[in-house]
Image (spheres, helix red, strand yellow):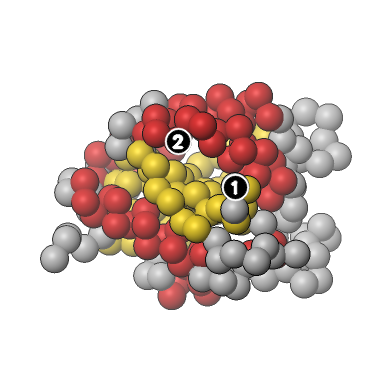
Amino acid sequence: MVGSSTPLIECFRGSEVGAYLKAVAKLRISVFRTFPYLYDGDQAYEEKYLATYAQSPDSVFVIAFDGYDVIGASTGIPLDHDGEVFQRPFVERGIAPEDVFYFGESVLLPQYRGLGIGHRFFDERESHARALGRFRWTAFAAVDRAKDDPRRPGNHRDNDMFWLKRGYQRRPGMTMHLSWREIGESDESEKPLTFWLRPLEPAA
């Protein structure tokens, strides 16, 4: 049940987020366990992953709180501060990684969806990238799942229309492969994720 207070949205830059890394890691494991990621997560790995974002002075963490509880989180980082596997699809298309601000993920507990928090996550990250003053694009990647995947819940709704309304376009062929262990797998396996891009207009 949603708390009585309106969720509070706060932004943290780089290492400022340190006190909340454990809570964000736990949240990622919970949300990504469901379709389409089906991620069988590990707390220690998640904290290490998020710590690499926090090491970038130009990264951003947008966190939603209900009281003292972290109920949603969204991240972003200059693409040239991220790993080569994330950069390669851009280089292959002639897009310089230093021109791209990459959105890592948005996770939000189900009971808080539909309150506009997802839009705030995008607004705040786009504003952060714009304020840095050196990016031409914002981008993110989403896992590819077949429409007839038998694990797809009957009530599942893809986010494609939401992303399209935000001005993002899926770029077929701009795909990377990441490995994680799905629920029911004994080991990690590679999954394809395709990038979505949006031109970032300069600050007014």
Tell me: 76 left or right of 183.
left
Residue 151 visible to the viewer: yes
SS for dot 1: loop
Residue type marked 1: Tyr
Q: Residue at x 29, y 57 (%)?
A: 127
Question: Is label 2 in contact with label 1 (beta carbons under 8 Å)?
Answer: no
Mark 2–mark 1 distance (CA, rounded to whole Å):
14 Å
Query: What amino acid type is highlighted by mark number 2?
Result: Val
Disc nearer the start of the sequence (2/1): 2
The residue pinned by badge 2 equals: 17
Q: Give the residue pinned by disc 1.
A: 68
Q: Is residue 190 visible?
A: no
The answer to whether 116 is drawn above or below residue 85 in the figure is: below
Looking at the rendered image, the quarter that the N terminus falls into is bottom right
Along the viewing direction, whichever of 108 and 169 lies nearer the viewer: 108
* Residue at the image point whose x is 30% and y is 46% from the top: 100
Q: Quadrant of residue 160?
A: bottom right
Residue 120: give x, y in percent of width and height.
44, 63
The percent coordinates of residue 97 (x first, y second) are 29, 40
Label 2 or label 1, whichever lies nearer to me, is 1
Q: Residue at x 35, y 39 (%)?
A: 13
Q: Secondary structure at mark 2?
A: helix
Q: Residue furthest left?
A: 204
Residue 15 position, x and y percent, is: 39, 30
Badge 1: residue crowd in 10 Å (few <14, some 14–19, many ≥20): few
Question: Position of 38 compared to 10: left or right?
Answer: right
**Above/below status of 139 relative to 116:** above
